[in-house]
Image (tube, rainbow, N blue to C red):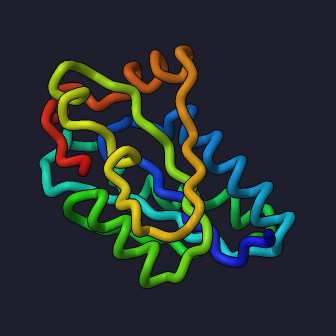
């Protein structure tokens, strides 16, 4: 099956830099899109929380994240949404008419995170497109923890 519209949903808000699993997501999307001649949408969702001063904004990180895809000659749309990630991702995927979603699972930070579950786990069963889950390795989880913005709210509305 050839994909024509590939959406990569990437968590950027709560990290100081792009995480290793997000980099792997980008590599996979680049390979798939180049092979199939697909358009790419890079999507990130941010919750309305205050971050540290002088920290790169989610919009800036999103543009920086998309740059290597554009540099590879891919047609890339960047989308930044606000609110509950699962709702925003689902709405975007449907409205953009994506035929593949690539999403990372996040490294759990604590008991509340585990109890709330991840955005990937909350995807609706009626999404009706293939979903490629990219799970972090133990090393990538440790690196993501190191990149987490200090004092970022523990409770984040993933689903």
Q: Is residue 65 left or right of residue 44?
A: right
Between residues 154 and 64, which one lies in front from this camera angle? Answer: 154
The answer to whether residue 42 is above or below residue 115 is below
Between residues 15 and 136, which one lies in front from this camera angle? Answer: 136
Between residues 8 and 111, which one lies in front from this camera angle? Answer: 111
The answer to whether residue 114 is above or below residue 54 is above
Of all residues, the one furthest to the front in this rendering is 125
The answer to whether residue 144 is above or below residue 129 is above
Q: Is residue 70 left or right of residue 86?
A: right
Q: Position of residue 45 (x, y in %)?
A: 32, 59
Q: Is residue 122 left or right of residue 142?
A: left
Which quarter of the figure is the N terminus placed in? bottom right
Q: Position of residue 99 (x, y in %)?
A: 61, 73
Q: How many numbered circles are shown?
A: 0
Of all residues, the one furthest to the right in this rendering is 35
Q: Position of residue 75 (x, y in %)?
A: 70, 76
Q: Is residue 122 left or right of residue 22?
A: left
Q: Residue shown at 39%/27% (left/top)?
A: 107
Q: Residue shown at 35%/61% (left/top)?
A: 124
Q: Residue shown at 69%/61% (left/top)?
A: 69
Q: Hey, which quadrant is residue 153 in on the image?
A: top left
The answer to whether residue 36 is above or below residue 46 is below
Q: Residue shown at 53%/82% (left/top)?
A: 97
Q: Position of residue 90 (x, y in %)?
A: 37, 68
């Amino acid at each position: 099956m050839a994909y024509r519209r590939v959406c990569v949903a990437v968590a950027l808000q709560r990290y100081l830099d792009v995480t290793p699993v997000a980099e792997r997501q980008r590599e996979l999307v680049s390979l798939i899109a180049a092979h199939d001649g697909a358009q790419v949408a890079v999507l990130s969702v941010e919750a309305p929380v205050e971050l540290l001063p002088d920290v790169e904004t989610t919009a800036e990180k999103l543009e920086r994240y998309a740059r290597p895809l554009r540099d590879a000659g891919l047609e890339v749309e960047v989308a930044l949404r606000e609110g509950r990630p699962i709702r925003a991702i689902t709405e975007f995927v449907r409205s953009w008419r994506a035929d593949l979603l690539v999403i990372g699972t996040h490294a759990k930070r604590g008991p509340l995170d585990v109890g709330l579950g991840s955005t990937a786990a909350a995807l609706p069963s009626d999404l009706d497109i293939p979903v490629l889950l990219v799970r972090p390795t133990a090393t990538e989880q440790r690196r993501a923890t190191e990149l987490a913005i200090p004092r970022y709210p523990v409770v984040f509305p993933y689903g």
